[in-house]
């Protein structure tokens, strides 16, 4: 039986608490947060068993999750080092690892860096749920302490997540490319529209459809992303440099009328690679799809399929979305045509499902 500590009971910390409190392997969840109302709410909902008055209350914890801004993680880990039991595992959920591990490698501390590949624009404990991590990839950073990694894996599996081991440097480069730089780009696009818009804000009025989809992540917490850019600046700068090279390249091709084929290939290559991610193809054609948020419980997928079948909507393909850091929904359903997808969207919304149009 594990005694769990959580420092930072916001959305992510709340989801960890609500998920683990159901586990037979967890006997206690002690939480600390500067927001006392969140702690009292969690205690009243029985998502936690104990409120910590300060970090000394974690001295009996077996595993402590640090769910704070990235800039605070190493500082908190160092403070906990001389308080916790010798075999207590300190872990985090931060999306960068290089700077944190560089600081913690200087001391003897049982720290396992981690990064669940889930996310939301939501904030605060009140918006958290008990199914966020279900079937999602949960990255654990490789180190020499295999015993601690195996123990942490056991708890990650209790979250119903999928643990994956990755080297710290590779992790930071991957997330800079697929997460951090896209956030920078999304925010840059929004700021571009703000800069170029007229006084009557016609651009803002008409900025729907594709523009809203590709800039959705720009609504994320600016403090968190300021921290991420500082902590992972070298990787972000490198990837941004490559992105700027690509922009300059396509800009030159668009400027040169002789580059018609090059322009076509630019979009064709991107389309083919993007289509290989989660959008399914039937007979070579990209099929319309929806992402649906469901809990990982018996009959959950069958229930969705039954609702659609009862309304004469045919499912062409169905699958689990494992990386949900910048994408809503745990279930990806592919439909026969756009009309079927739109009908399915409306019916599932009417049945109180959270649904996201992904293409």
Image (cartoon, grey):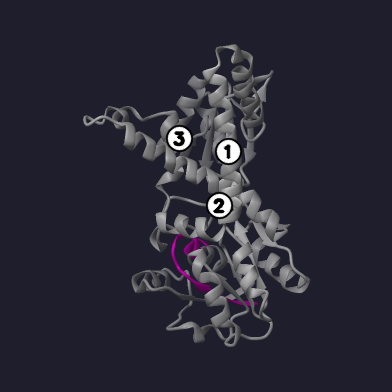
Q: Is residue 91 above or below residue 53?
A: above
Query: In what element is the residue under mark 2?
Result: loop
Disc 3 and disc 2 in contact, CB within 8 angstroms: no
Tag 1 secondary structure: helix
Mark 3 crowd level (few <14, some 14–19, many ≥20, 10 Å Cα)? some
Residue 64 rendering spot, x and y as whole percentages: 58, 74
Q: Reading the chain from its start, which is encountered first: label 3 or label 2?
A: 2
Residue count near mark 1 (Cα–Cα under 10 Å), binned few <14, some 14–19, many ≥20: some
User: Is mark 3 in CB contact (under 8 Å) with mark 1?
Assistant: no
Q: Answer whether residue 5 is magenta in the image.
A: yes
Q: Looking at the image, can residue 293 be seen?
A: no
The residue mark sitting in front, 3 or 1, is 1
**What are the residue bounds of the magenta stretch?**
1-15
* Residue in view at x 52 percent, y 64 percent: 70
146 with respect to 130 (left or right): right
Rendered image: mark on residue 257: none
Residue at mark 3: 213
Q: In whole angstroms, how far apart are the C-alphas of marks 3 and 2?
A: 18 Å
Distance from disc 2 to disc 1, alpha carbons, whole Å, reads 24 Å
| x then y, percent, for residue 20 | 57, 66
Give the labeled residue for mark 1: 243
In the picture, the quarter occupied by the N terminus is bottom right
Q: Which residue is mark 2?
A: 118
Expressed as whole percent of the image width and height from the top left, the position of residue 344 reads 48, 29
Seen at 54% across and 61% down, the residue is 231
Specify whether 20 is left or right of 53.
Answer: right
Compared to 312, does 329 lie above or below? below
């Amino acid at each position: 039986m594990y005694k769990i500590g959580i420092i930072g009971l916001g959305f992510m910390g709340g989801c960890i608490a609500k998920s683990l409190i159901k586990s037979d392997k967890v006997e206690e969840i002690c939480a600390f947060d500067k927001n006392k109302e969140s702690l009292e709410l969690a205690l009243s909902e029985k998502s936690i068993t104990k409120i910590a008055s300060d970090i000394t209350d974690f001295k009996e914890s077996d595993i402590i999750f640090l769910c704070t801004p990235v800039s605070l993680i190493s500082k908190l880990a160092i403070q906990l080092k001389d308080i916790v039991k010798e075999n207590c595992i300190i872990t985090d959920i931060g999306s960068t690892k290089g700077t944190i591990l560089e600081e913690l490698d200087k001391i003897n501390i049982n720290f396992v860096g981690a990064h669940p590949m889930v996310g939301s624009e939501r904030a605060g404990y009140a918006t958290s749920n008990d199914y966020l991590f279900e079937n999602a990839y949960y990255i654990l950073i490789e180190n020499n302490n295999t015993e601690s990694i195996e123990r942490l894996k056991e708890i990650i599996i209790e979250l119903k997540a999928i643990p994956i081991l990755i080297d710290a440097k590779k992790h930071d480069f991957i997330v800079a490319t697929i997460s951090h730089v896209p956030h920078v780009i999304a925010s840059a696009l929004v700021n571009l529209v703000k800069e170029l818009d007229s006084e009557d804000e016609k651009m803002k009025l008409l900025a729907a459809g594709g523009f809203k989809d590709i800039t959705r992540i720009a609504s994320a917490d600016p403090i968190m992303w300021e921290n991420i850019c500082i902590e992972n600046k070298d990787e972000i700068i490198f990837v941004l440099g490559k992105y700027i090279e690509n922009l300059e390249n396509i800009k030159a091709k668009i400027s040169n009328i002789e580059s018609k084929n090059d322009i076509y290939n630019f979009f064709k290559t991107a389309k083919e690679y993007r289509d290989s991610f989660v959008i399914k193809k039937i007979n070579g054609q990209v099929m319309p799809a929806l992402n649906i948020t469901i809990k990982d419980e018996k009959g959950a997928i069958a229930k969705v399929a039954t609702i659609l079948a009862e309304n004469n909507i045919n499912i062409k393909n169905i699958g689990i979305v494992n990386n949900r850091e910048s994408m809503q929904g745990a279930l990806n359903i592919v439909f026969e045509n756009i009309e079927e997808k739109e009908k399915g969207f409306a019916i599932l919304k009417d049945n109180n499902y959270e649904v996201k149009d992904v293409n």
